[in-house]
Amino acid sequence: MRVWIDPNADVDEIKEQIKAINRELYERLLKIDPSDDFFKHMVKPLRSSIRVNTLKAEVDKVRENLENIITGEVPWCREGFFVNTDDFGRIPEHQLGIIFSQEASSMIPPVVMDPEPGMKVLDIAAAPGAKTTQIAQYMENEGCIVANDVKHSRINILISNLQKCGVLIAKVTDKDGRFFGRFGERFDAVLVDAPCSNMGMIRKNYKNIKLWRLRDCYGLSRLQKELLVAAYKAVKPGGVVVYSTCTLEPMENEEVVDYILRNTDAEIEDIDLPLRRTKPFLEFEGRKYVGEVKKCLRIHPQDNDTEGFFVAKLRKP
């Protein structure tokens, strides 16, 4: 499927192009953020970025070796850098697992989780493994990570990335993530990087414009709530659950967090990172969310010139 948008067109033409491809999406985007800057960045080509794998190399040394392609630092991740290439096949450090190609906003959830060596961590939807390998490096390969994914077809790439990055503490499983709800209070931290409608990834691949359907969001929202409840059951008292998506749809973001806050004793924490953000929705299409939802991290593409992203940090008292 090939979908083309001219990112150099003026904003009115960009809007017309999106409307012509998927009117339903266009009307939804207007409700989420009608600003011209938002629509320009939704189709602006995405900057490439990498994360240094500290299990294999020191950040400063890699930065020195790759100074010819590094264009800047990712402010919220000391191992993250923006680069001026997407041809990673020609970079030996990539083939050796010394660096990992990872979108800058995708680095946020492990930073927010802040795992420590010796922990037991569950990554409930782990493939292809970017965040799993990032968690492992913060744990310094000490402890245990259960790296799970429901799609058997994605397990091989997950295992490959874990091996390439030198992760020694991961146990790979291929279960429906809701399965882990039966393991009550076993994990110190859980990541729910949930399957979503990919609205935030439009600038990475324009085919997401054509593929997006509002009807899919209803089913995804139900699944996300069930995954988050399972994760909350699985985490120990005092433990952390990080919920994240690469969509901007409130039904899959604020509504899911609102659900867990209303139906459990979960507490939500502020996320203090050096980045720009958009205020979370406290009401959308007549549905009101609890005030604590304001602590979620909602990132629109124009905020930091990244993908659209959403993160919430929950703690079990």
Image (cartoon, rainbow, N blue to C red):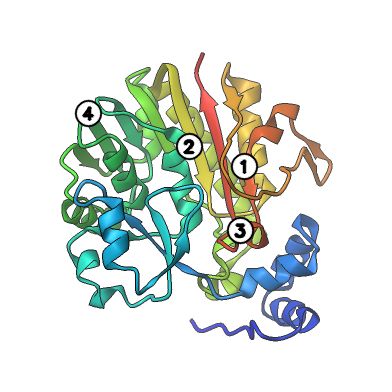
Residue 229 in picture, x, y percent from top left? 50, 28
User: Element type at marker 1?
Assistant: strand
User: Element type at marker 2?
Assistant: helix
Could you tell me the amino acid type at mark 4? Gly
Query: Which residue position is annotated with label 3?
Result: 304
Could you tell me the amino acid type at mark 2? Val
Residue 223 in picture, x, y percent from top left? 52, 42
Badge 1: few (under 14), some or many (20 or more) residues near its Cα, within 10 Å?
A: many
| Distance between mark 2 and mark 3 Cα atoms | 17 Å
Query: Which residue position is annotated with label 4?
Result: 143
Nearer to the camera, 60 or 190: 60
Residue 34's place in the image compared with 259, above or below, is below
Query: Which residue position is annotated with label 1?
Result: 297
Q: Which quadrant would residue 213 be assigned to in this image?
A: bottom right
| Distance between mark 2 and mark 1 Cα atoms | 10 Å
Badge 2: few (under 14), some or many (20 or more) residues near its Cα, within 10 Å?
A: some
Residue 31 in picture, x, y percent from top left? 79, 57
| Distance between mark 1 and mark 4 Cα atoms | 28 Å
Would residue 127 be found to the left or right of residue 6 on screen?
A: left
Earlier sequence position, callout 1 versus callout 4: 4
Could you tell me the amino acid type at mark 1? Leu
Circles 3 and 4: CB atoms closer than 8 Å: no
Badge 3: few (under 14), some or many (20 or more) residues near its Cα, within 10 Å?
A: some
Circles 2 and 1: CB atoms closer than 8 Å: yes
User: Element type at marker 4?
Assistant: loop
Residue 44 in picture, x, y percent from top left? 61, 74
Of marks 3 and 4, the one in the foreground: 3
